[in-house]
Image (tube, grey):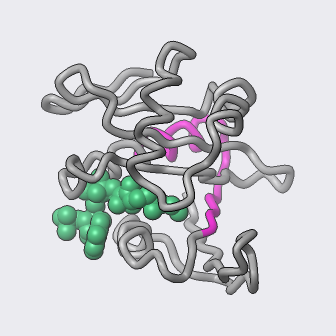
Amino acid sequence: MTTNRGHVTIRRALFSDFDKIVEVEASSFKRPYPPTLLFSLLRLHGDMFYVALADDETVGYVVGAKRRDGSGHVISIAVRPEWRRRGIGTKLMEALLDDFKKRGLRKVVLEVAVSNREAIAFYEHLGFKTTALLKGYYPWGEDAYFMTKEL
Ligand SMILES: CC(C)(COP(=O)(O)OP(=O)(O)OC[C@H]1O[C@@H](n2cnc3c(N)ncnc32)[C@H](O)[C@@H]1OP(=O)(O)O)[C@@H](O)C(=O)NCCC(=O)NCCS
């Protein structure tokens, strides 16, 4: 699926996007996923991996997966800092949620670090609700909120 809205294009990620996805990740997280993990996600979940292109630049990505219980899982989303607050994260998430719906999934879940106020505000804006606290979820010991949304 390819979606064109203004100058931002959302499309499925290709292996040729890999280096740019690594750059988006490095620019977005204090503790970025290692490139090997991003490559595995592209290989295993490429059908639910989307990138955002603006002026031919790769400015964001989102990757999801179907869970065993039949819900959709948002594994990761990031937009380059200089491209934030322009609706690109929303467009990426819309593409993924649309994909989940087309596969018949009725619920979507994610984890977010309790200190990540920006992401929590973003997910709340999209209609996610915090439904659980996951104590010590991250390898560095931080708790996560488990957030869910019905599709
Ligand atoms: C979370 C993230 C993907 C949002 O991307 P984005 O393109 O800036 O999001 P949008 O522009 O679509 O934001 C939509 C709405 O979410 C809310 N929101 C987004 N960022 C926010 C912030 N920093 N503070 C408060 N609200 C915010 C706002 O309601 C915003 O609408 P508005 O700009 O009209 O006020 C981006 O901040 C990011 O890459 N963060 C670093 C990586 C990360 O933490 N990912 C999540 C890991 S769980």
The single residue placed furthest to the top in the displayed view is 16
For residue 129, above or below residue 83: below
How many labels were placed on the picture?
A: 0
Residue sitting nearer the eye, 143 or 133? 143
Left or right of 8 in this view: 106:
right
Q: What residue sits 66% from the left and 53% below the top?
A: 73
For residue 40, above or below residue 1: below
Q: What residue sits 71% from the left and 24% below the top?
A: 43
Left or right of 43 in this view: 68:
right
For residue 53, above or below residue 130: above
Measured from the top left, where is residue 103 in percent x and y? 65, 36
Q: What residue sits 33% from the left and 29% below the top?
A: 58
Measured from the top left, where is residue 6 in percent x and y? 13, 31
Magenta span includes 96:
yes
Measured from the top left, where is residue 117 in percent x and y? 40, 78
Quadrant showing the N terminus: top left
Magenta residues, start to end = 94-111
Residue sitting nearer the eye, 4 or 101? 4
